Amino acid sequence: MALPFFGKKPVPAGSPSPRPRTSSGAAASPVSSSAKSSRSSTPRNETSSLDFTIAGGDLSRVLAQCADKVHVEEGVDEMTASVEEAAIVYANGCYDEARGVLEQALATTTTADARYALWGMLLDLFRLTGQKERFESRSLIYATEFERSPPAWHDLSPQATRTGEAKVQTVNLSGTLSGQAAAQFVQLIQIGMRNGALRIDLTRLRGVDNAGAELLLRAVRGLRKARIKLSLVGAGHLASVLGGQVANGRRENQTTWLLLLEVLQYTDQQERFEELAVEYAMTFEESPPSWEPPPAATASQIDAAVLAVEMTDIYVLEGEILGPNTEALRKITAFAASRNKVEVDCSRLRRMDFVSAGTLFNIVSQLHTQGRLVVLKGVNSMVAALMQVMGLHQVARIELRD
């Protein structure tokens, strides 16, 4: 039987709980008493707050014991036990052991849906650990067995960003840009500073208010000052949108004027820039910026994996999230405060440990009880399996990464 999040459709929040999948060994692990009682006696569809802090503070020991003690109980589906064990072992950072669990399960599992789920996890594991040769050899077997194309290779390992030519992530902006996107612009700047380059797609922006114009202007100027290679896709489109918000001789929306002049430098419209610069000088009686088109990222640098972030609508989790009190998780509650639908982009999230997944469950459970729909988008299969173990599929919709 396939796990719900491995199907073609995402699992709706609040869907019925599958058959219980606890094990006596896992229940005996030294996780705090509230977490223990929640997993053993409380149905997974309840949203009571759980405590995933660690007794004694030895996180590695706890996770290792969890991984070692997962076993198949009588009456529990074999695929379920293998998925849980692989998920917990991977969460503990034991990648070779996780691969062994999955390969052993594939050697003994015959159900088509179960094999499809296990293959998805194994191929994702190879991508997450940068094992291209193993990925390609197993992909041939996958294609033969299922008579369909395997997932495309993407190196999702930490080493991928530290070797070879720097890759450029693409961030998509859409809707109306306002001051509510301040937290997301912090993340945007961090992405650019970390990678040394950034590509922002503006083609789906419908409007920009004064606060949003100031956020984008500060981000673009700051990245340029830091010598980050920045590409603005759809700069001409945004220039047209901004052009309708300024008027020669009208001393208002000065930030919008400055953003328009900045954006035009990412186009080939130098003549229009010069005309607008003269109008700006006459309107505000101060010198305008000069024409200094920035260097753009080369086509070979552009990462095929687009970070599809609608800055006003999506929160981003990325990298490895470990421990119960990470700032990235705590900020989700504040981000969700003004939203009924809370979308979280997990396409760059490589790994969570057992404790951070429990913290995420606590946060999402609270949002669920408030009537908010939480959607975890682009989750890799290994992390999605851990989310399933923790019961997150009961309070959120989990959408797998391609």
Image: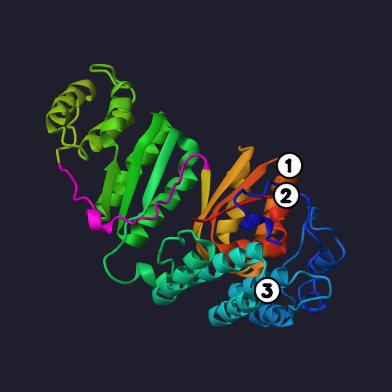
Residue wearing tag 3: 82
- Mark toward the viewer: 3 or 1: 3
At mark 1, the secondary structure is loop
Between marks 3 and 1, how big is the CA–CA gap?
Answer: 34 Å
Q: Is residue 53 visible?
A: no
Residue 401 x %, y %:
51, 56
Residue wearing tag 1: 370
Secondary structure character of the magenta stretch overall: loop
Whether residue 386 sits left or right of residue 40 in the image: it is left
- Mark toward the viewer: 3 or 2: 3
Residue 131 x %, y %:
43, 75
Does the residue at mark 1 contact the one at mark 2 (Cβ under 8 Å)? Answer: yes
Taking 256 as reference, is 348 above or below it? below
The stretch in magenta equals: 292-313
- What amino acid is labelled 1 in the image? Gln
At 30% from the left edge and 59% from the top edge, which residue is drawn?
196
At 20% from the left edge and 38% from the top edge, which residue is drawn?
265
Q: Which mark is residue 392?
A: none
The mark that comes first in sequence, 3 or 1, is 3
Residue wearing tag 2: 366
At mark 2, the secondary structure is helix
Between marks 3 and 2, how big is the CA–CA gap?
Answer: 30 Å
Taking 224 as reference, is 265 above or below it? above
Closest to the observer: 228 or 376? Answer: 376
- What amino acid is labelled 2 in the image? Gln
Whether residue 254 sits left or right of residue 175 in the image: it is left
Q: Can residue 137 be seen in this view?
A: yes
Looking at the rendered image, the quarter that the N terminus falls into is bottom right
